[in-house]
Amino acid sequence: MREDQIESVRRFNRAVSIRIGTIGESFLGLGRPYGEARLLHEIGAGGAEVRDLRARLGLDSGYMARLLRALERQGLIASAPSKRDGRVKRIRLTAKGRRAYAGVERAGDDFARRVLAPLEARDRDRLIAAMGEVERLMRAFAVTIDREPAGSEDAAWCLAEYYGEIAARFDAGFDPARGLVTGVADMTPPNGLFLLARLDGRPVGCGALLVEPGGHGHIRRMWIAREARGLGLGRRMLGALEDEARVLGLHVVRLETNRALDEAKSLYRSEGYEEVAPFNDETYAHHWFEKRLDEAGA
């Protein structure tokens, strides 16, 4: 990336932090710093679990604990074990906290009106469109892709969502038992691996790489949640699986797909995959693809 691009990002950060008032001890005139006000907003009227708040805000546990203690000292929040999991702490607003939360919401609305009021209608639309594009790209950079145990709760959730979606899209529906079976053991080293994409701590995509004889890698179960589409995440997941294959010393990656998945076929072709003769008897496949990683790397 270019130096002028880095400077542009830094200049934008400075401008936004000054305009929205994150510098100082009284965010939007509320008499409390930005961190506390933001945390009140995220807890909201329905409450929230601490681990979800930490993931959503991208805060380390120490800083989150300090913020929570500050709100608790002010009588704004109370905590109790989660009904879903007693090991997890759930935070709720007290009556005083609900009044403070309402004040944060009013101040946020008032600030938005002050931003938009001086602008002509055309410029308001331009600003909103630009904000939407910045938000989309910032969400893209916030996505992480890491190895995940194939038997984890998040992995199982992603696979269930994947199965449900392709069952609705395939002409003949989808039954995992009728196609090539890919179990947890197949997606666990040394047989293979499973990658999980997360956004704000939530799973939003997955992909598996199976290690096969002859230096071949077999990519399966690649899926991106609807909420994360349009962020280039499918291409990133595919690239991450290829990188894992290179680390494992594999020379060729292969995959198959259904004729209903036009976007998948377009992605594979754009990333250098060539259509080949069937290399397995997957019931739901109509197209088989292959890519040589040594040539791609060269």
Image (cartoon, rainbow, N blue to C red):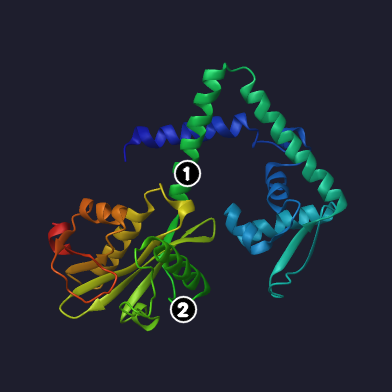
Q: Which residue is mark 1?
A: 138
Please give the name of the residue rendered at 44% of the width and 76% of the height, measured from the top-left corner.
149
Front residue of this view, candidates 67 and 245: 245
Left or right? Give the position of 288 relative to 228: left
Q: Quadrant of the C terminus?
A: bottom left
Q: Which residue type does callout 1 highlight?
A: Met
Front residue of this view, candidates 62 and 165: 165
Quadrant of res 167: bottom left
Residue 119 placement (x, y as % from top left): 58, 18
Please give the name of the residue rendered at 73% of the width and 64% of the height, measured from the top-left corner.
90
Residue 3 placement (x, y as % from top left): 34, 36
Q: Residues within 10 Å of mark 2 (few under 14, many from 20)?
A: some
Q: Residues within 10 Å of mark 1 (few under 14, many from 20)?
A: few
Q: Which residue is mark 2?
A: 151
- Secondary structure under badge 1? helix
Residue 242 sits above or below residue 7 on the image: below
